[in-house]
Amino acid sequence: MAPPKSSSGWSRVHSDEIRGSAFEVPGFNADQQDELWQQIKTRASTPRRRRVGWRGVVAGVVAVGAVGVAGAAAADVFTAHTGKGPADAEDVELGGPGERLNPSAPDFAAVLSQSTSDIPFPSAQSRNSALSWEVEDLSDEQNTLVSVGALRLWTAGHALCSWSNEWAVALSAADTRAAGRAADVILGARNWPSIKDTDADLADESEAAWVPVLEQAVRAGDSAGAKVALEGQACMPGLAPELGMGKRW
């Protein structure tokens, strides 16, 4: 993946168009945030799907930041925000752009929610499930940091997975209007800042190289092809049961 490029081509008009094509979703309020933490605390441990790319190297790349994490904890200032960014272009390439966050901090769920608030999901439930999974999945990463850019890209993947499920459900029900609305969101996602600012290339072995494959499947009305594009990359278990991804929540 090439270092992130400028987002100067992105305008408020583009953002309004993306938001306008999505179903209306209630805000992620304080009660839902409390519910998110309750799910994390009470859910039994289950096998987790690990993704390739940044997910596999994040511990090795940013473990050096553990000294700063420990220092903050010792000073009783334990927050997910570290104020640390990538050291150089290679650091961006390996771990993603943006501030490095501490996923073991007590406010990590709230920081994750705020950092991904612009990413459209088809429902509050799908958003809550996606964020809950990220918090749980990263909670066992000891003495490591994770970039905001990586978290935003992964969350965008979850959103696309959720929209793909909406599209597949509508396709199966021959609901052309609903299928068209979901398809419009999916096909416009490559311009979301969470994807464009992090992985503008969408090619070869980049983090979001699966997006064009998903687009091709959606244009062809090929739900099996959509499953192939998403499986092992963006879909956590439970976000796309219509595509045969299985249930989790």
Image (cartoon, rainbow, N blue to C red):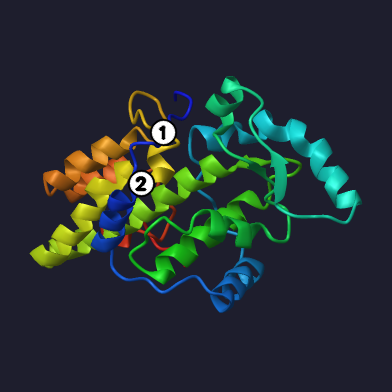
The foreground one among 180 and 230 is 180
Q: Quadrant of residue 68?
A: top right
Identify the residue shown where x is 76% and y is 41%. 143
| Quadrant hosting residue 219 | top left
Q: Is residue 131 left or right of residue 192?
A: right
- Residue receiving disc 2: 192
**152, above or below 93, in the image:** below
| Residue 106 in the image, given as x and y percentages of width and height | 73, 61
- In the image, residue 164 above or below residue 56: below
Specify the amino acid type for callout 1. Answer: Asp
- Residue 233 visible in image: no
In the displayed structure, does residue 177 sit left or right of residue 100?
left
Q: CA distance from mark 2 to mark 1?
A: 10 Å
Residue at 41% from the left image edge and 49% from the top image edge: 156
Rendering quarter of residue 107: bottom right
Q: Residue 78: in sight, yes or no?
A: yes
Out of 17 and 192, give the one closest to the viewer: 17
- Dividing the image into 4 quarters, which one contains the N terminus? top left
Residue at (42%, 70%) from the top-left corner?
A: 124
**Which residue carries the number 1 mark?**
199
Element at label 2: loop
116 left or right of 88 in image: left
Where residue 195 appears, as percent x and y from the top left, is 39, 41
Label 2 is placed on what type of residue? Trp
